[in-house]
Image (tube, grey):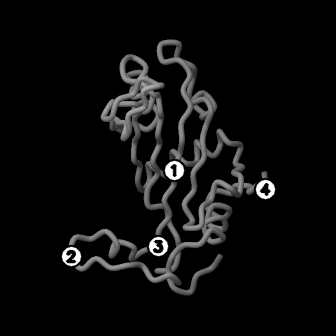
Amino acid sequence: MEYSNPMRKPRIEKIVVNIGVGESGEKLVKAEKLLEELTKCKPVRTVSRHKIPSWNIKKGDPIGCKVTLRRERAEEFLERALEAKENSIRESCFDDNGNISFGITEYIDLPGTKYDPDIGVFGMNISIRMERPGFRVRWRRFRKSKIPINNLIKREESIEFMREKFGIQISEE
C-alpha cells in the first residue's frame, strides 16, 4: 500500500515475547535462560494478579517471564518467528486495532535453535503492537492527547503491512 503522507505509514512499535510457566522455581529459571538465548535480552518476571487456590498460586507469585523487543531486534526476531509459523498467520490473530498475537508451540521450531535437554520444551506467545509516527502523543509526559479515530491503525492496514513487509500468508482458519 502506497502512502502519500509518510506519517500515515504503519510500523512495529514493539514485540513482547512471553513464556507462561505457571509456577516459580527451576522451571521459571529455565524459561528465563531460554528467552535470553533466543532474544539476547534480559527477561523480566511476570507475577500473578489473582489468587488461584486450585492451582496453588498466590497473588504476587512469579509465574512467567517476558522480553520486550524494539526496532531492528524486533524485526529480526519476528522474521524467525514467522518462519517457525511457515509464514502463515490466521486472520483471527489480528485485533481491531491492528495489533497481532500468535503462539509458537515449541521453541525448537524457530530456525537456528536446537533442542537443549537442560532446558526442556517451552512454547511462547508473541504480541506485536503497531503504530504510526506521531503516536507518541498518547504516552508523553506533558500534554498527553488521544489519537483521532481516523489515524488509528485498522485490521486491514495491519494485514496489508505484514503481507508487504514480511511476505506472510493470511489464512481464514
- Along the horizontal axis of the image, is 122 left or right of 36? right
Provide the secondary structure element on which disc 2 rests.
loop
| Contact, mark 2 vs mark 1 (Cβ under 8 Å) | no
Q: Quadrant of residue 142?
A: bottom left
The vertical placement of 141 against 36, above or below, is below
10 vs 128, nearest the viewer:
128
Type of amino acid at the residue the image marks with label 3: Arg
Work out how far the residue at label 2 is from the one at label 1, CA to CA, in angstroms: 28 Å
Q: CA distance from mark 3 to mark 2?
A: 20 Å
**Label 2 is placed on what type of residue?**
Phe
C-alpha distance separating marks 4 and 1: 19 Å
The disc at residue 142 is 2
Residue shown at 38% from the left, 38% from the top: 50
> What distance separates the C-alpha of mark 2 from that of mark 4?
43 Å
The disc placed on residue 127 is: 1
88 and 101: which is toward the camera: 101
| Quarter of the view holding residue 48 | top left
Q: Earlier in the sequence, mark 2 or mark 4?
A: 2
Residue that mark 4 sits on: 172
